[in-house]
Image (tube, rainbow, N blue to C red):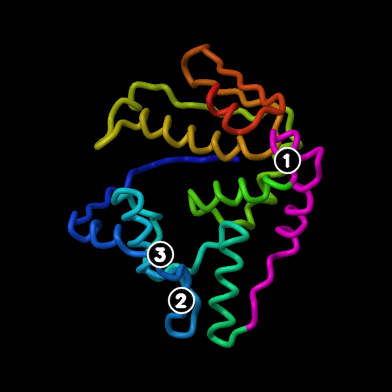
Amino acid sequence: FTAITTGIIVFAHKQKDINSFKTMTAPKKYIKINGIMKLNPEYKKWREAQQGGQPASTTNDQALPVVSSMQDHEALNESMTSYGEPEVALSESTNATIEIIQEPDISFEAGMSPDTMVDALGDLLNKYEVPIGLMNKLICFSEFQVLEFLIDDSGSMNVGQPISRWQEAQSRLKEMIEVLAYVPFNQIEIIFLNRSDRVSLQRQGRHPKSFMDDA
């Protein structure tokens, strides 16, 4: 698992456009464009407005839909059937992962009950628009004893606009740890290139919110 952040994309929106979408009800998330089911551009604008003008994602208007949760999958199939198209089945690995995380011993390791873990993880993936198919990869982290994050703390990390590379690294690390908080893992170690400091985070079966409060 390696993540490299090399730049920042800045989006600007006119306030009047944002306000108009704030008062709307949610448009359909998926629509068919030129015979292809895609993410509805109006849904993207609506979601950005709900987030105070922050971009819903970095994808463009031609992107295929991202299915992040079971609710997304249901909405996609509803849209497909409304166009007379067959439903889209989840992949075998995704179905297998859903079965795995509903096992009590797995869900309890993540500090949740079997009934809530699928929805909780789906909500988180939806928040960052991560495809539901990656659930299978996330569960694999439970096989490792320690997950190490190596942070560049050299002087060059203090440059960058509108935020420094150091601030960006902090933000990305927080997002990655938040995702990991919703899957079973044993221990996270945060180490640095130059300093000897080491941060150790133990899971110990805690609920994701409890773990994030300490992290």
- The mark nearer the N terminus, 2 or 1, is 2
Label 1 and label 3: CA atoms lie apart by 30 Å
Pick whichever, 184 or 8, lies toward us.
184
- The mark nearer the N terminus, 1 or 3, is 3
Q: Which mark is residue 31?
A: 2
Left or right, 43 with reference to 183: left
Query: Which is in the foreground here, disc 2 or disc 1?
Result: 1
Q: Position of residue 198 (x, y in %)?
A: 56, 15
Q: Which mark is residue 125?
A: none
Left or right, 67 with reference to 169: right
Left or right, 190 with reference to 137: left
- Mark 3 secondary-structure assignment: loop
* Quarter of the N terminus within the rendering: top right
Q: Amino acid at mark 1?
A: Ser
Q: Amino acid at mark 3?
A: Ala
- Mark 1 secondary-structure assignment: loop
Mark 3 and 2 residues: CB-CB less than 8 Å, in contact? no
Neighbor class of circle 3 (other Cα within 10 Å; few <14, some 14-19, many 20+) is: some
Mark 2 and 1 residues: CB-CB less than 8 Å, in contact? no
Residue, disc 1:
113
Label 2 and label 1: CA atoms lie apart by 34 Å
Quadrant position of residue 75: bottom right
Q: Position of residue 62 (x, y in %)?
A: 40, 71
Q: Position of residue 162 (x, y in %)?
A: 25, 37
Q: Position of residue 123 (x, y in %)?
A: 56, 50
**152 to 27, vertically: above or below:** above
Q: Residue at x 38, y 55 (%)?
A: 58
Residue, disc 3:
26
